[in-house]
Image (tube, helix red, strand yellow):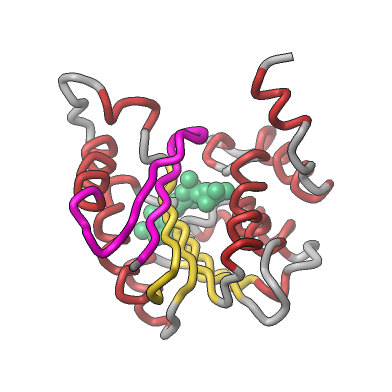
Amino acid sequence: MTIDEYILSHTDEESELLRSLVRDAGVNLLRPRMLSGHLQGRILKMFCRMMRPRRVLEIGTYTGYATLCMAEGLEEGALIHTVEINDEMEDFMMKYISRSPDRDKIRVHFGDAADVVPRLGETFDMVFIDAGKHQYTAYYEMVFPLVRPGGLILADNTLWDGKVAEDPPSSDKQTAGILAFNETVKRDERVEKVILPLRDGLTMLWKK
Ligand SMILES: C[S@@+](CC[C@H](N)C(=O)[O-])C[C@H]1O[C@@H](n2cnc3c(N)ncnc32)[C@H](O)[C@@H]1O
């Protein structure tokens, strides 16, 4: 047994709904690895259990995998707004969201997060940034004023397959975007931050 298998076998299981979503994504989607997956999904749910957010924002829905995991951890009356630019994902994600016992806690919005989020008119207790890597700093600056003090911002893929620590740094746009984001938040004294070396790197930012 590998250590990853050991971790998963001693972590809460995914629901049957999530398992069928993952199988379906593996067969029918081009980039199934973009979805959060078993371990990160259970961690996102646990963050919701611990933070007890009333309002959550996710930027980048894709299949709805992480949305469903976070919704599982929300209390009655709490909501997750999730924003996806690619409306071709609608049929896939709605197939699963509509079958979830937590569907009433989920609001899906299609469009560019830069346009959609300011129009939601909400403040958030928790935000999960997981969309275009070259736009991470822009997403961060957009959501920061909408997060209440004491709220949590999570940003996925902040180690970007280890490319952030390469010397010389890779100059591709996505790596540059992640590097710029990591430098911005490192200098930002309005937040306490930790990069969890989970999967592809998950940065936790706690707003003072
Ligand atoms: C890594 S996937 C999201 C995975 C999902 N959060 C999860 O953990 O299961 C990133 C998604 O962000 C979407 N996206 C990219 N740019 C966006 C933007 N500006 N606004 C909203 N969604 C965007 C992409 O179409 C893609 O579906």
Q: Which residue is at 45% across, 43% downward? A: 202
Q: Is residue 39 above or below residue 161?
A: below
Relative side of 64 to 61, left or right: right
Relative side of 154 to 35, left or right: left
Relative side of 57 to 132, left or right: right
Queried whether the magenta region covers residue 76, the answer comes back as no
Q: Which residue is at 53% across, 56% downward? A: 61
- Snapshot quadrant of residue 89: bottom right
Q: Which residues are magenta?
A: 186-207
Queried whether the magenta region covers residue 193, the answer comes back as yes
Quarter of the image for the N terminus: give it: top right
Residue that extends furthest to the top in the rendered view of this protein? 1
Q: Is residue 172 above or below residue 15?
A: above
Q: Name the foreground residue: 122 vs 82.
A: 122
Q: Position of residue 45 (x, y in %)?
A: 65, 55
Q: Position of residue 98 (x, y in %)?
A: 75, 66
Q: Is residue 85 visible?
A: no
Q: Is residue 4 visible?
A: yes
Q: Position of residue 76 (x, y in %)?
A: 72, 78
Residue that extends furthest to the bottom in the rendered view of this protein? 121
